[in-house]
Image (spheres, rainbow, N blue to C red):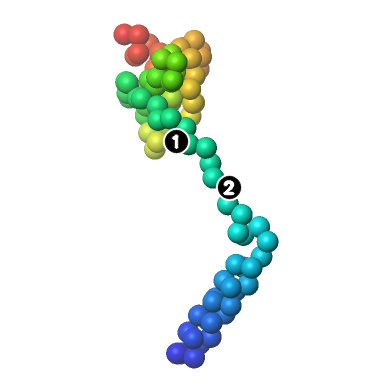
């Protein structure tokens, strides 16, 4: 059993060394960092979460997430919110 484990570890080490020399594995691309958005308001209704977010210009946009935290709509305007999610729009207005 020890021989099998050593053989397996050796093959993993060999594969790692082989992949390290492959072209393309040494190139890294850094993602642009965006400024953090400020979440001003959170409303939960019927398993949906509405976040009011202020962008750099100060205009409010809205993110809608499911109850599991999955993004359903990103940075939509108030008019788009009223068309796509009328219940959340009413909760926001009322």
Q: Which residue is mark 2?
A: 29
Disc 2 packing (10 Å; few <14; some 14–19; many ≥20): few
Residue 58 sits in which quadrant? Answer: top left
Q: Secondary structure at mark 1?
A: loop
Rendering coords of residue 73 (x, y %):
49, 26
> Going by the image, does 36 lie left or right of 26?
left
Give the label on residue 70, or none: 1
Q: Secondary structure at mark 2?
A: loop
Give the label on residue 87, or none: none
Rendering coords of residue 48 (x, y %):
39, 27
Residue 35 sits in which quadrant? Answer: top left
Q: Is residue 36 above or below residue 27?
A: above
Estimate the spatial distance between the alpha carbons at disc 2 and disc 1, rounded to whole Å. 26 Å
Q: Is residue 20 above or below residue 77?
A: below
Disc 1 packing (10 Å; few <14; some 14–19; many ≥20): few
Image quarter of the C terminus: top left
Q: Residue at x 43, y 20 (%)?
A: 55
Disc on the earlier residue, 2 or 1? 2
> Going by the image, does 32 lie left or right of 48?
right
Residue 48 seen in the figure: no
Residue 66 sits in which quadrant? Answer: top left
Q: Is residue 86 above or below residue 42?
A: above
């Amino acid at each position: 059993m020890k021989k099998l484990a050593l053989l397996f570890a050796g093959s993993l080490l060999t594969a790692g060394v082989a992949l390290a020399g492959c072209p393309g594995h040494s190139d890294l691309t850094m993602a642009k960092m965006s400024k953090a958005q400020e979440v001003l308001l959170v409303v939960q209704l019927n398993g949906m979460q509405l976040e009011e977010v202020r962008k750099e210009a100060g205009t409010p946009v809205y993110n809608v997430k499911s109850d599991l935290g999955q993004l359903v709509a990103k940075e939509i305007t108030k008019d788009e919110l009223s068309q796509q999610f009328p219940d959340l729009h009413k909760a926001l207005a009322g």
